[in-house]
Image (cartoon, helix red, strand yellow):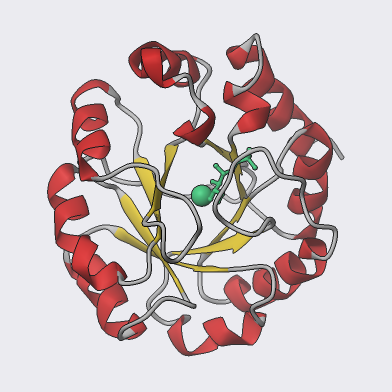
Amino acid sequence: MISMPQLKQDKVYIAPSILSADLTCLGNQVKLVEEAKADWLHIDIMDGHFVPNLSFGPAIVKNLDKMVKIPQDVHLMVQEPQKFIDPFVKAGASALTIHAEARGNIRETLKQIKKAGLWCGLSIKPDTNAATLVPYLDILDLILVMSVYPGFGGQEFLPKSTEQINQVAKLAKDHNILVEVDGGINRQTAKIARKAGAQALVAGAAIFGQPDIKQALADIRNAALAQ
Ligand code: DX5
Ligand code: ZN
């Protein structure tokens, strides 16, 4: 397991989502984003219940852990996250993010993640009130704001997300919590999300879906940093 980095205030963190990678050559694709200085990999886990789609299991994290030197930020879009904490810890995840809308005891699940020495994250869907996060601010390292309805890559950034990011950034500010935004991030929306208070940006289609993956990553980072 590779630990998440010590955060720097002025940096913007770029997390390519392998959901949009060419899985016939995942190893090569991941090497490309590593060379392009991706900060961590974003791994989307879907169970077909919490979201209407299926994706990967712990084996993908275990395999990537053998070959990448950057952290793995695992996003659990699953109905019962507590069942899956141990397998993903064992597989080598660096950060584990669960959903506030999931079943079970959210605080206990977050504690379990923290106890294992991982960054613990909580995500909210576009229609979930930012205030839902308040009871967990003391324990969180990361808040993942969904700027699309979760389940699929390649969707468009929802304009109403800007306000939600703003609200979350205000909550996160005094608690040293990283605000990460996920869904529809490209050169234009990277700027919008950053301005609204995001410090980390997940991008799938806008990186792995592009002919020049390295350039696409650099373009998003530069756009986010531009004033
Ligand atoms: C969506 C996933 C996202 C997705 C982002 O449910 O959580 O991480 O891969 O993909 P893009 O950047 O293509 O919207
Ligand atoms: Zn995600």
Which of the pair 111/125 is nearer the observer? 125
Q: At which x and y percent is residue 166?
A: 76, 69
- Is 81 located above or below residue 194 in the figure? below
Would residue 94 be found to the left or right of residue 132 on screen?
left
Would residue 111 be found to the left or right of residue 184 on screen?
left
Q: At which x and y percent is residue 75?
A: 42, 54
What's the residue at 14%, 60% (across, down)?
A: 86
Which of the pair 104/173 is nearer the observer? 104
State which quadrant residue 120 falls in: bottom left
What's the residue at 79%, 57% (across, down)?
A: 158
What's the residue at 53%, 17% (across, down)?
A: 36
Q: At which x and y percent is residue 27?
A: 34, 16
State which quadrant residue 48 falls in: bottom left
What's the residue at 40%, 21% (across, down)?
A: 23
Would residue 115 be found to the left or right of residue 9 on screen?
left
- Is 197 located above or below residue 131 in the figure? above
